[in-house]
Structures are given as C-alpha cells and as structure tokens.
Amino acid sequence: MPRNHMLEINNLHARIGDATILNGVTLSIGAGEVHAIMGPNGSGKSTLAQVIAGHSDYEVVDGSVSFFGEDMLQLEPEERAQRGFFLGFQYPVEIAGVNNAYLLKAALNAKRSYLGETEVDAFEFLKLAKEKMKLLDMDPSFLNRGVNEGFSGGEKKRNEILQMAVLEPNLAFLDETDSGLDIDALKSVANGVNALRSKERAIVLVTHYQRLLDYIKPDFVHVLSNGKIVRSGDYMLAEELENKGYDWLREVSTG
Amino acid sequence: MTTHEFDQAVFQKCVASIPDSALSAVRHAAAAEFGQSGFPTTRHEDWRYTNLAPAIAIQQKSLLERERGDRQLNPVDVIDIVEACWIRFDDGEFSFPLNDLPPGVTINRLADSEQASVIDVKNSLSQINAALLRDALHVTIAAGVTIDRPIGLLFAEHSESPALANHARVIISVEKDASVQILEAQLSSGGGDVYINTVTQLLLANNANVNYVRLQDCADHHVQTNRLIANIGSRAKLTHLAFDLGAQLARNDVEVALNDSDASVTLNGLYLADGAQHIDNHTRVDHAAGPSFSEELYRGILNGKSRCVFNGKAVVHEGADGTDAAQANHNLLLSDDAEVDTKPELEIYADDVKCSHGATVGQLDANALFYLRTRGLDEETAKHAITKAFAAEIVETIAPSQIHDYIQSRVDAKLDQLTAKNQ
Ligand SMILES: Nc1ncnc2c1ncn2[C@@H]1O[C@H](COP(=O)(O)OP(=O)(O)O)[C@@H](O)[C@H]1O
Ligand SMILES: [Mg+2]
C-alpha cells in the first residue's frame, strides 16, 4: 500500500544565479513520519529547505513539489505557511524593531484566519505563548524583544522552535536547528519537537549529527550529496554515517 | 516655470489692497523686498532639487481670483483626538479660545499691537508671507510656568475654490524657566488647489523647554512650504519632531540658532512619500555660543516615483567651543523609481568640538521580508511591520500621550498606503 503522502518532492532541480544546486531530488514524506536529511556541507540541504519555503532567489528549473496534493511551487511563501508548512531556518533572520510577540500572534492569526477560525485575542495569545515558552525553558521576556534581535545562536534556535510550537504546523522542516546548541538547549529543542509529534504531523530534521537523533528518533534517514538523495535508509543509516562519514557515499554517487 | 511668470504687479496691488494696521510698515517693506527677490528658483543652491512652480501657479491664480467661494469647514479629526488648547487657522482665518487659555498663556494679535517688528522677513518665502498678512498671532508662555495642556496649532484648509494661497504667521515666546508642549497639525481637505505658506518663530528664553511636534498631512494635491525660525537661550532646550506624510510638494526649512551656552536642540523627522510626492527638508543649526548641543535624526520611506530631499547643516561658529553636533539621515526606498538626495553638512570654526554625521539610503531587507512571509504574514503585512519598525525610531521619540497615539495612527495609515500591493 502506498503511504498517504503529505509532501511529495519529485525530480526537483533548482538553481541560484548560474549555479545549479539541486539536481533531481525525489522524496516523499507521510503524516506521522520523522525524516532526517544528512549530508556534507554544501550538498544543498538548506537550498532544498528554502526552495520548499518559497524563496524567490531560487529558480526551480524542473520537477515538482506537492503539499497535501496542491502544487506548492505555485504558492506564495505565506500561503505555504498558512497551509501548515514551517521552516526552521539554519540562520534565523534578525529583524530590528519588529516585536517577537507581534510576529507570533500575527503568524498564528494568519493561519487561523486561513483555516476559517477566529483570531486569538491578546489575552489568549499570551497564555498560549507563555505555556509554550515554559516547555522550551524560555524566559517570557523574549516576547518583548525584536525578532531574533541580539539573540545568541542558541536563543535564535529556541526561538524558531517556539514559533513552531505556537503554530503547530503539519510539516516542520528544521534546518540544522541543533547546530551550535549546548546539551540543555538541545534537550529543550528536542522537547519542543517531540511535543509536536503526532499521527497527523510530519517532521524533517536536517542535521550533521547523530546527537539530535538520539533524542528524536527518525523513521527514515536520507543522505543528500551534490543536490541529490544518494541513499535512504532507517535509523541504522545514521549510525553508519556517524562511524564512516560521507566519503563512502560520495564514491557510490559518482561511480 | 520661472519667477518671470509670477506677476509682481498683481501681487503689489493685492498687498496695497489689504487694510492698514500696525503691520503695514512691515508688510510694505517685505513686499518691496519680495519684489526684488521673487520666489526662489532651482538656480539657488538651497533649492536645487525643489521647483516651486506648482506653488507659484496657485499663488498667481489666487491673487487674480480673490473672490473666495462659500466657505465650509470640514471636520478635522485631531481636534477630537488630542485634548489641547487649540488655536485654529481655517483657510487662513484664525480663532482661539480667548476665555479658556491655560494660566500663563497669552495670545496677542499683531495687527493691533506694537510688536510687528518681531516679524522675520529674512528670506523670500518669509517676505511674501509677511507682505500678505492681514494679521498674525503672538503666543506668550509666562516665565516659570509649566503648561500641562498642550498648545495646538491647527492649519486646516477646506477650500473648494479653484486656487487658494494662504500665508500664516505665528510667533511663540517662551519666557525663562517656562515649559510647554506644542502640537502643530497642518491638514487639508477639499477639492481646490491650495498653497499654504506658514512661518513660525520660536523664542526660547533662558532655561525654557519646548517640545514641538509637527504633523504635515495635507491632501495629496496641495502644496505647502513652512519655515521655523528658533532662537534658543542659555540652558534652554527645543525638541522638534517633524512628520511629513502628505502634500504634492512640501518644503520645510528649520533654522535654529543656539545663541548661548548650554542651549540645545533635538531635530527629529520622519517623511513618508509615495506616488509623485516631493518632500524637501532643509535644516540649519547655528551654534553661535559654546558649549551647545544639537542632535538630528531624520528618516524617510519612499515608494512610487516620489522624491525626497534632506539637507541638514550644522555650523559651529568661532567661540562655540565644546559643542556637540550630530546629524544622521536614513532612507528606505521601496521602489526603483523613488529618489532621495541627502546631504548632511558640517562647518566647524571652533575648538574641542564633537561632531558626527552620516546618511544612508537602502532597500527593504529581502531576508527579513521572506522570513516574515514564511511565518504566514502576507507581503503587505510583512512590509508594513518592517517599515513601521523603521519609522518607530522617530515615532517613539514622542513620549506616551494622545499626541503620540494620534501621530502613530496617521503614520500607520500612510504606511498602509505605502506598502499596499498596487504601489
Ligand atoms: N546565493 C548563492 N549563490 C551561489 N551559490 C550558492 C548560494 N547560496 C548557496 N550556494 C551554494 O549552494 C550549495 C549548497 O548550499 P546549501 O544549500 O547551503 O548547502 P548545505 O545546507 O547542504 O550546507 C553550496 O555549494 C553553496 O555554496
Ligand atoms: Mg545548510
């Protein structure tokens, strides 16, 4: 029986300027699944994430992406978000002067109004935000700061997870959310992700390290190399990569 | 159009037709000077980027068709929103609550006082302004008094006449140790073409404190020029916050003289332009004594084919030792067709002076915009949030108050327009 796929990436080719970065990515992600995408630096993991999120600097030259059966590439970035796609950025953007609480509330209400739900008021929002911050061990004072403004690397990553926790997306694509985190921060992030896990939702973890996967056990592991998935497997593949590195796969892919 | 097309003969006849008053001598002298100088042209260094042709055309027509149609006052929101002692100029005609002035405030009409010589006529726009005055107001804040209720100055144009030019003059003397907050609102409605030329003179005696917020949000077919001349005494402080949102063509000249030691001035400004708007802010601070302090921050957001000019000049004169002067101007261009000319200038003839100046012109941060959109905010909302944060650096220099909230709402409305999709 084919799985019921939430996200279908088929033969995706994308470039930025003259550089072709994705060379035919094919990947299916079903509800309830956790996928890990691993791969050497520069292999195109962030590019894949940005293309799926709708960054206009990247040009899709071939292939398709569908989300709940809808052609995702035709949608604006905000429409993708409103339909339940969430990207945790590898490098979250600092936006001076735009209040963190404002963004969270506006984002939540954008999604709710797309779904035909009533918007949350300031009181309900604050209650929800504080609850989620507790889960992530975040100080409520972060709500009143500019979006990622002056945040440390770890604080930015926690803030991404906070946004995810508030938005409760159908599909969370987390791009190296674990990099640069100390063990406590890593545990908070893992808590946030595990709290989101459910039969209806899917999670994609882009990571370099087995470390995160000890806390969030993936159902599938993929290796991206030169803009292509060169190997897929289960959790055992992650362990194999941890022991052997990527070189053995590069050889496979080129020859 | 050049000054040659302005009919000086009609102008002089019009000046002569204004009834005699205590202002007559000043008016006739100003008219004679304006006869020589005329309107500034783009050949003047200070007017290189700003062509007053639309103002001249309206002025000319207004002089020829002096019959004013039936006048009807449109509602003006600020009166209901900000509690203040409102002094109104409706289509140039003033009114004020003579019996309800806050203690310490007096208002004199210059047409029947002996104070006409205080009227400044140093540049040509001040000259035509003075020449055509039927009256002018002199507001005095008594020594030592802190006025709790803001003084409101409303310049409201309602005209449906084909062309109307108005010249208004207010002189505000703040005596020593007095403190006052002033909100000036320059608003217009009505279908007629309007040119409004206002001159405000501010005199701050020793240790006086003035917080002056100015909003210009005229209809987008109107033209306005404004000149503020401020003289600041020892230990006195002027904070001037200028918001330019409206008008087809707006030119503001702010001239501040720091005449004594420890005089200080803060000049902040925000201009938001779209369509074919042209907004020009010229400021000049003269540090005549030291130490004295000036800081200036203007920010602008431009869209469409708008054009803005910023020229901020600080002159630190000989002997003004120990002075601090800082100027900055930052601009955000939302379209490729918008244009800004910015020039902070410093001239220093004193010792031990701390000066800085800088200007930037940039675009909306594409990464910030994308980030917000990936969270579900549509493009307009995301742009509004980013531009609002940019504008907040100026808006938030107004202390929490009705004035703050009123300005914020006007700025928000303009930002909505600026970030709308079809721009
Ligand atoms: N703006 C850009 N212009 C040209 N090349 C780029 C740009 N951004 C990324 N790349 C290149 O694309 C490749 C993939 O980058 P990226 O997707 O960030 O890899 P990963 O996330 O797997 O480390 C790299 O070789 C990188 O240098
Ligand atoms: Mg990356």
Image (cartoon, helix red, strand yellow):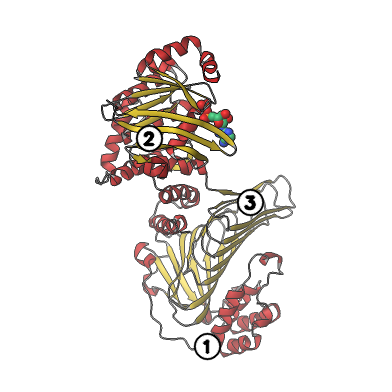
Nearest the eye: B282 or A207: A207
| Mark 3 element type | loop
Left or right? Give the position of A203 relative to B302: left
Residue B292 image label: 3
Seen at 40% across and 74% down, the residue is B98
Nearest the eye: A48 or B195: A48
> What separation in Å lies between label 3 and label 2 (alpha carbons)?
54 Å
The spot of residue B288 in percent (x, y) is 68, 57
Q: In this rendering, does residue B35 appear at all?
A: yes
Mark 3 and 1 residues: CB-CB less than 8 Å, in contact? no
Seen at 63% across and 84% down, the residue is B28
Nearest the eye: B322 or B76: B76
The spot of residue A19 in percent (x, y) is 58, 35
Q: Is residue A240 above or below residue B283?
A: above
Q: Is residue A22 above or below residue A119?
A: above
Residue A182: quarter of image: top left
